[in-house]
Amino acid sequence: MSAETSAGSPSPQVESLRANTIGFSGVLFQSITTTAPASAVAFSLAAAIPFTGGALPLATVIALLVCILVASNIGAMAKYLPSAGGYFTYVNRGLGAQAGWGGKRR
């Protein structure tokens, strides 16, 4: 797996990414899919103006604060419960097996 030095101890093998593995189209696609949710929110604000009027800035600030609280909670859970299950694991461990669908099946 790794090359041995003359003293007989293994030397660390350094692996790196191959050059030009991801091209421009791959990077562009990743950028679009990453910014799509934020773009949807930004473009939907114009549709909210007739319904909220002058309260739109306040509603936006409140929504931002709620998003920050949710993100900080997810970050805290991820720090102590790293798992590929993500939200399922957080709900299961935080609220119990019944809420996380981890209870006994009938």
Image (tube, grey):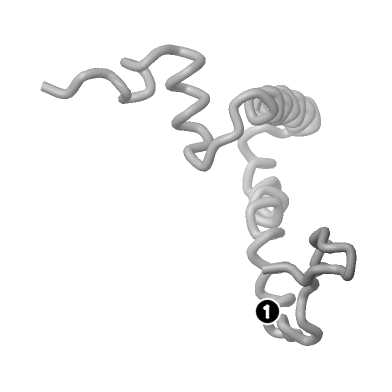
Residue at 63 percent across and 48 percent down: it is 47
Q: In this orientation, which residue lies closer to the viewer: 25 or 20? A: 20
Is residue 38 at least partly visible in the picture?
A: yes
**The residue positioned farthest toward the left in the image shown:** 106
Q: Is residue 29 left or right of residue 20?
A: left
Q: Is residue 23 left or right of residue 14?
A: left
The answer to whether residue 88 is above or below residue 95 is: below
What x and y, as percent, mark residue 87? 51, 32
The answer to whether residue 38 is above or below residue 67 is: below
The image quarter in which residue 64 lies: top right
Is residue 62 at least partly visible in the picture?
A: no
The image quarter in which residue 70 lies: top right
What x and y, as percent, mark residue 62? 74, 24
The answer to whether residue 45 is above or below residue 101 is: below
Q: In this orientation, which residue lies closer to the viewer: 72 or 65? A: 72
Query: Mark 1 highlights which residue?
Result: 26
Residue at 44 percent across and 31 percent down: it is 88
The answer to whether residue 67 is above or below residue 41 is: above
Residue at 21 percent across and 19 percent down: it is 104
What x and y, as percent, mark residue 97? 35, 16
Quadrant in which the C terminus is drawn: top left
Q: In this orientation, which residue lies closer to the viewer: 47 or 106? A: 106
Q: Residues within 10 Å of mark 1 (few under 14, many from 20)?
A: few
Q: What kind of residue is marked 1?
A: Gly
SS for callout 1: helix
What x and y, as percent, mark residue 66? 69, 24
